[in-house]
Image: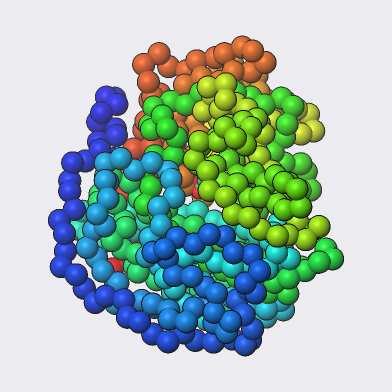
Amino acid sequence: MERGAVFAGLHSNHLLSPLSSRASASTLSPSPLADGRHFCPPLLKLPSQSHFASYSNKQHFSSSIHVASPTSNATSESADIDWDNLGFGFMPTDYMYVMKCSQGENFSEGQLLRFGNIELNPSAGILNYGQGLFEGLKAYRKHDRNILLFRPEENAMRLRMGAERMCMPSPTVEQFVEAVRETVLANEKWIPPPGKGSMYIRPLLMGSGAVLGLAPAPEYTFLIYVSPVGNYFKEGLAPINLVVETEMHRATPGGTGGVKTIGNYAAEGAFCVRRSKKWLLIHCESAEYGDSCSSFRSVRIAEISLGPSARLWLVLKAQSAAKAKGYSDVLYLDSVHKRFLEEVSSCNVFVVKGNVISTPAIKGTILPGITRKSIIDVARSQGFQVEERMVPVEELLDADEVFCTGTAVVISPVGSITYIGKRVSYGSSGVGLVSQQLYSALTRLQMGLTEDTMDWILELK
Ligand code: COI
């Protein structure tokens, strides 16, 4: 099959025709928090950007909150950005969704707020003990201007599983899906035109209440923000080059590798260093592990006074070191035998040999990816034999193709894998046939270009 034909759905030249502005966001008075307390005492405040609302009001999130009516789309005019050059970088949009509850209670009512920085008590559970989860899903603009979500209830259920593991309350599936729907519609103008990318939706669930001794936080915040995105890897859809990590491990049996806890993904390019009596939080938009602070290219610094219990943001060492050597990412092995494939930093992995597609079984250390699960079903429906099992690293040497799956990466073909100094390449001319075929089937479904026989798509209009 021709590569161009397979990827045609993603490279459409179809441009979004601007719609007339619908009802715009209205300015409403803020509602007090349900428990009458502050969202967070304003003790730690990252620098706010001038066009964002800031939340420093003593009683409420904000003294004047712009709330988008859930029944009216804020505006469906397209944002004025270069849709042809989207990468996977954060771009602020108009609104975020926030819902909170106390420990032992249930989430009840959330609201859309102007997108902006949030304030957290330095003693918040998420900052001190990593009590936090995130999710990732995408919204696609269809040619008929409808907006499509891909299996949002699966994200809701995964969040609930993770919350149970992390001792946190979580929104119901219905609350989650409704919150996603409201957030996407309020930010509709940031959804890329068909074929130009997608809107990445990032739900967060965090222990926002203050703790000092190790314990579940007394208060929780569920927050959703969105950002228009293009391809995750800088290679775009071209095959990526992986290196097998033999020393460091992503997860251990009995740990949290199987849930989407923030700690599993320790921040790349975010460092905390101690300078005299202050902690400096340094954001580096482009930095390699091992760079000295002075050599960071794009740096924003917030000086924060933290107590002695403050934790460091850790650099994801293995990935940063691999990137410094020119690899796209790291493929982790299991921590017990140091022999079986686990996952790549941000995605699951599949190995193709003939008609058999193998992927590491879900057994507690591997994230149960929604794209992983979907690709297994799509592949089986296309006649492939899919095996979920322990996959020894040696099988990479003999594979026909290898590809990765994830919400952010979608399907990323692997061009080469280096294992203990030995490099194995897959396919001499670009993307393998099986990867192409599955990529095409999945993305056409996600973008509404083929009939949704699986009942996976939620249309928002
Ligand atoms: C996703 O694929 O949605 C993820 O959450 C992975 C993240 C590292 C971008």
Q: Residue at x 17, y 46 (%)?
A: 14
Q: Residue 45 location, x and y as percent?
A: 59, 64
The vertical placement of 32 against 340, above or below, is below
Number of on-image labels: 0
The vertical placement of 105 against 209, above or below, is below
In depth, the one of 167 and 304 nearer the eye is 304
Decide if residue 390 is on the left or right side of residue 141. Answer: right
The answer to whether any part of residue 70 appears in the image is no
Q: Residue 174 location, x and y as percent?
A: 50, 73
In depth, the one of 257 and 51 nearer the eye is 51
**Quadrant showing the C terminus:** bottom left
The answer to whether any part of residue 107 appears in the image is yes
Decide if residue 237 is on the left or right side of residue 318. Answer: left
Q: Name the image quarter holding residue 11.
A: top left
In depth, the one of 455 and 201 nearer the eye is 201
Q: Residue at x 22, y 63 (%)?
A: 77
Q: Residue furthest front?
A: 276
Q: Residue 346 location, x and y as percent?
A: 56, 41
The vertical placement of 19 against 197, above or below, is below
**Quadrant showing the N terminus:** top left
Q: Residue 56 location, x and y as percent?
A: 55, 74
Q: Residue at x 26, y 57 (%)?
A: 79
Colouring: rainbow
The vertical placement of 69 against 364, above or below, is below
Q: Residue at x 57, y 32 (%)?
A: 295
